[in-house]
Image (cartoon, rainbow, N blue to C red):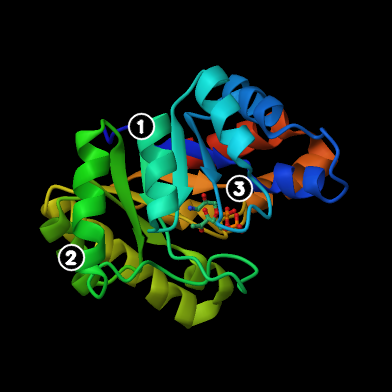
């Protein structure tokens, strides 16, 4: 019996719609509570330096009101470290960030930024948050995660989602090999970015993967079918894959 595969719903783009007009709706916290009721095992929220979607107030309200664990995504900056230490979320996932990017473009260079990350990982863990590193599915990055003492890595699935045919199969193999290597080294494996109903199954079928974080697609589909229904459908696809 493989462990249950958890679904983390990323609510960033509920805030994107809200911020389009500076209104109070749609409320990301309301979306988070609804997603939890529909079967989400956790909520992911990315507090970006430019606050283009999730705001500091959203994080404060999520911490106060969520009924499932919060996974706070953040860049490796002193500002974000201070916010994470103050709120002490269940989990913190350190992600790369470029102000000019439309969305995350790749994994964190944990190997190249080792000296910057080491004290940050240590302080977040000592503060009681489960630290995750959002990385490319590469042995070099997994080795860095081991040396940093990160208990979790989230493997970037964006390239897999963009590719097709043999190239996508090769990227899936790369992700599966990275998941096996990370698990062999005692690291819990998560995956995310760009996942949809159509491409989730092969990722969900990787036995070492314990959590998927999925957002943009679900929020888009919710416009047509409602957030509860699309969360339930993604949950069912993930369960069928195991
Ligand atoms: C790290 C990752 O892939 C996402 O969780 C991230 O939040 C994407 O950024 P946007 O939500 O701003 O598109
Ligand atoms: N870390 C991945 C995540 O939280 C959601 O990514 P996406 O589904 O919005 O691309």
Cβ atoms under marks 3 and 1 closer than 8 Å: no
Considering depth in this image, is 16 or 87 the residue closer to the camera? 87
> Looking at the image, is mark 2 or mark 3 nearer the viewer?
2
Whether the residue carrying mark 3 lies under 8 Å from ligand 2 is answered with yes
Cα gap from disc 3 to disc 1, whole angstroms? 20 Å
Q: Which residue is mark 3?
A: 215
Residue 220: x percent and y percent?
75, 49
Q: Earlier in the sequence, mark 2 or mark 3?
A: 2
Packing grade of label 1 (10 A; few <14, some 14-19, many >=20) is few
Residue 138: x percent and y percent?
27, 72
Q: Which residue is mark 1?
A: 4
Would residue 138 be found to the left or right of residue 87 on screen? left
Residue at the image point whose x is 48% and y is 31% from the top? 42
Would residue 24 be found to the left or right of residue 93 on screen? right
Q: Which residue is mark 2?
A: 144
Residue at the image point whose x is 69% and y is 37% from the top? 230
The N terminus lies in which quarter of the figure?
top left
Q: Tag 1, which secondary structure?
A: loop
Give the answer, above or below, for where 117 lies relative to 57: below
Q: What mark, if any, has residue 22 been given in the picture?
A: none
């Amino acid at each position: 019996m493989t462990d249950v595969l958890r679904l983390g719903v990323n609510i960033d783009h509920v805030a994107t719609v809200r911020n389009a007009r500076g209104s109070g709706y749609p409320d990301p916290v309301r979306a988070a509570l609804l997603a939890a009721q529909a079967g989400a095992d956790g909520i992911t929220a990315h507090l970006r330096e430019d606050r283009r979607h999730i705001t500091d107030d959203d994080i404060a309200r999520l911490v106060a009101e969520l009924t499932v664990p919060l996974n706070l995504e953040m860049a490796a900056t002193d500002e974000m470290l201070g916010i994470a230490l103050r709120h002490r979320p269940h989990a913190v996932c350190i992600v790369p960030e470029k102000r000019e990017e439309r969305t995350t473009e790749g994994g964190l260079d944990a190997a190249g930024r080792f000296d910057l990350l080491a004290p940050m990982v240590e302080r977040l863990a000592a503060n009681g948050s489960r630290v995750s590193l959002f990385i490319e599915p590469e042995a070099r990055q997994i080795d860095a995660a081991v040396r940093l003492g990160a208990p979790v890595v989230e493997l970037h699935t964006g390239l897999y989602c963009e590719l097709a045919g043999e190239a996508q199969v090769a990227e899936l193999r790369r992700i599966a090999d990275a998941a096996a290597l990370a698990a062999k080294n005692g690291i819990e494996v998560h995956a995310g970015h760009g996942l949809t109903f159509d491409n989730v199954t092969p990722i969900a079928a990787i036995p070492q993967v314990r959590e998927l974080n999925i957002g943009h697609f679900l929020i888009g589909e919710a416009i047509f079918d409602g957030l509860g229904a699309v969360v339930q459908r993604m949950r069912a696809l993930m369960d069928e894959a195991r």
